[in-house]
Amino acid sequence: MRRFLSSIADIQIERLIGVVALLAIFVVMLTGVVLRYGFSFSLTWYEEFGRYGLILITGLGIGAGIKNRSHIVIDNGYLPVSLREAATLLSSLVTLAFLCALAWYAYALAGALRASRSPALQLPTGWFYTAIAILALLGVARVIERALRAKSGS
């Protein structure tokens, strides 16, 4: 089990998808600006593409931030060791609760908006909310992974 967790933890899926998404946003936005100001031709969908791409990158940041411990934290170093562990556990539980609620409501919205389409790209709006739910569940997996690693001492 420890080897499996280690192999999952070493996968930098958030970073890989984030880099590809950022490059795609850059290329599409640059193309849109050049076409608009250089050739007086405007793409109708490039702003929407950038918006949804940034939402994807933000969602990926949840899992990556938890994995790398780079989110903002409150220092509990002044607490006694026994309270430090309890504070860390409470923090993890609150994070899990938030991410589970985010996943639940995003999935519910995806179902409610399954017939709706985005204005420019004409993609089902439910896809975007499903992606948010999946990314929140990735964050849940990263919180659990962090807790298991802390418990095993690695």
Image (tube, rainbow, N blue to C red):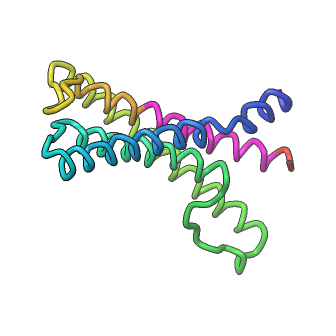
Is residue 45 among what the camera can see?
A: yes
Question: Quadrant location of the N terminus?
Answer: top right
The image position of residue 104, as x and y in percent, is 37, 33
Magenta span includes 146: yes
The residue shown at (62%, 60%) is 70
User: Looking at the picture, does residue 112 appear above or below residue 73?
Assistant: above
> In this image, 24 relative to 148: left or right?
left
User: Looking at the picture, does residue 125 appear above or below residue 15?
Assistant: above
Magenta span includes 52: no
The image position of residue 110, as x and y in percent, is 27, 27
Q: Residue furthest bottom?
A: 78
The residue shown at (80%, 47%) is 151
> In this image, 25 relative to 153: left or right?
left
The residue shown at (15%, 37%) is 44
Q: Quadrant of residue 73?
A: bottom right
Taking depth in this image into account, of 62 and 150 the one nearest to the observer is 62
Is residue 101 among what the camera can see?
A: no
Q: Quadrant of residue 53?
A: top left
Taking depth in this image into account, of 15 and 146 the one nearest to the observer is 15
> In this image, 110 relative to 97: left or right?
left
Q: Which residues are magenta?
A: 134-151
Dominant secondary-structure state across the stretch colored magenta: helix
Q: Residue furthest front?
A: 39
Number of numbered discs on residues: 0
The residue shown at (34%, 48%) is 30
